[in-house]
Image (spheres, grey):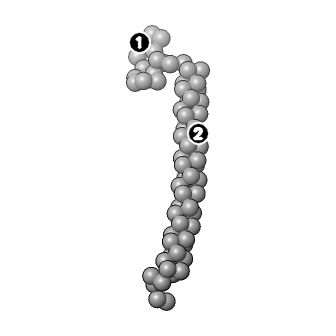
Amino acid sequence: MGAGDLGAPKPRGFMAEKDAFARREAAHELMYIREQEMEKVKRLRQKLKEQRQHMDELDKHLEEFAKSQGGEQN
């Protein structure tokens, strides 16, 4: 090793040139984005659940209507 060498190779890649603050900030941004995406997924799942319930109600009404019209003999 030469004078002043610390013994570890210089890191390479995207985060190599960033300091600890920049890495921490990038991690916080990624966490925030992930939380926002998870919230969107949660809202979409709730909306899907509501739509399924509505479709089930419509199916029930259609069955009742068909029975009242004499379309089915049960």
Residue 49 visible in the shown view: no
Instruction: State left or right for residue 72 relative to residue 56.
Output: left
Total marks placed? 2
Quadrant where the image shows the N terminus: top left
Disc 1 marks which amino acid? Answer: Gly
Q: Which residue is mark 1?
A: 2
Q: Residue placed farthest to the front in the image?
A: 69
Crowdedness near tag 2: few (<14), some (14–19) or many (≥20) residues, C-alpha within 10 Å: few
Q: Nearer the viewer, residue 41 or 30?
A: 41
Q: Residue placed farthest to the bottom in the image?
A: 74
Q: Which mark is residue 63?
A: none
Q: Position of residue 46 (x, y in %)?
A: 59, 53
Q: Quadrant of residue 53?
A: bottom right
Q: Nearer the viewer, residue 19 or 6?
A: 19
55 or 24: nearer the viewer: 55
Q: Nearer the viewer, residue 39 or 46?
A: 46
Q: Which element type, helix, strand or loop, lies under badge 1?
A: loop
Q: Which mark is residue 35?
A: 2
Circle nearer the N terminus (1, 2): 1
Quarter where residue 2 is shown: top left
Residue located 45% across and 82% down the image:
71
Q: CA distance from mark 1 to mark 2?
A: 47 Å
Q: Position of residue 73 (x, y in %)?
A: 46, 89
Q: Is residue 29 visible?
A: yes
Q: Residue at x 58, y 49 (%)?
A: 42
Can you name the residue that lies furthest to the top here? 3
Q: Is residue 72 above or below residue 60?
A: below
Q: Amino acid at mark 2?
A: Glu
Q: Secondary structure at mark 2?
A: helix
Q: Nearer the viewer, mark 1 or mark 2?
A: 2
